[in-house]
Image (cartoon, rainbow, N blue to C red):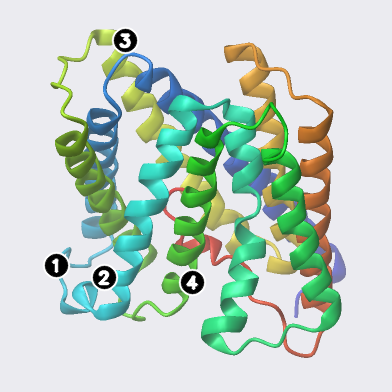
Amino acid sequence: MPTHQSLHRANLTGIVWMIVAMAAFAVEDAFIKVATQQLPVGQVLMLFGAGGAVLFAGLTLRNGSRLLIAQAFSRVMLIRALCELVGRLFYVLAIALTPLSSATAILQATPIIVVLGAMAFFGETVGWRRWCAIVAGLVGVVIILRPATDDFSALSLLAVVGTLGFAGRDLASRAAPAALTTWHLGFYGFLTVVVAGVLFSWWDGKPLVWPTTSNAFGLAAAVGTGVFAYTALMKAMRTGAISTVTPFRYTRLLFGIGLGMAMFGERPDGPMVLGCAVVIGSGLFIWWQGKVATKPVLHTPLVQDPMG
């Protein structure tokens, strides 16, 4: 039977892995933003998706599983693929066209939207306290967007659509067939990114550009950090208690804002800081309520999230 000391050590290890994972996901976003400044967005998506698919294919085969299995083409997986396509396409567009810090801030609303979706699609119980937290979290997103001010940019809605797509992907991941491993989900998730790139390139009409050595290195670094982040995320969720390590997902916001300031000269203003605080506070309250409730609130199924 695990001792209190061993459980404490496991939770501490899980927290460290979660923070490392969030830092790596933020670095991945920064590499992608740099790549989109030099290459067409559709091409970046295709190359990024292909690189990730190859790595996850190798991990799937090393795990002794076949890549092509019937369950991967079930209805729920097709819905997941559609949500993945929307989430990744619009979030990459948000990274490319808006400040990294604001896109990262809006993304933090994903767990709140997942809770709302869990109530609508899975019959999860959501009491009035969590309803208030959900509404507060959405108000926090509105504060970040500032739709009624001169500072509002319609391009910020790209991150909102991307966040909705990621929330739908996470909800579909919960219903994914048990025969599919996390490596399968990563493989098919990255293949969907390739499809998103092809479709956007066709719509955008921009010619493909032969990547320079620095472009290739940046995209390879984005893929490498993304796969590392996913691996660290799984270690976090499998080492510590989920209720203990999950709140540290919000550290991604700190890393995203920090990288935005250091690499791209971004300067978050008062409304953004206030909106971030409201979103994070709402998410933490929902997590706390889910921890003490008889029927826990659904949290984002992090071990099934191949790209953060």
Q: Earlier in the sequence, mark 1 or mark 3?
A: 1
Q: Which mark is residue 78?
A: 2
Examine the rendered structure and indicate whether residue 53 appears above or below residue 69.
Answer: above
Pointer 1 and pointer 3: residues touching (CB < 8 Å)? no
Mark 1, other Cα within 10 Å: few <14 / some 14–19 / many ≥20: few
> What amino acid is labelled 2 in the image?
Leu
* Label 3 sits on residue: 214
Pointer 2 and pointer 3: residues touching (CB < 8 Å)? no
Separation of marks 2 and 3 at Cα, in angstroms: 35 Å
> What amino acid is labelled 4 in the image?
Leu
Separation of marks 1 and 3 at Cα, in angstroms: 34 Å
Q: Earlier in the sequence, mark 3 or mark 4?
A: 4
x, y percent for residue 104: 60, 38
Q: Secondary structure at mark 3?
A: helix
Q: Secondary structure at mark 2?
A: helix
> What amino acid is labelled 3 in the image?
Ser
Q: Nearer the viewer, residue 294 or 81?
A: 81
Q: Nearer the viewer, residue 299 or 167?
A: 167
* Label 4 sits on residue: 171
Q: Secondary structure at mark 1?
A: loop
* Label 1 sits on residue: 68
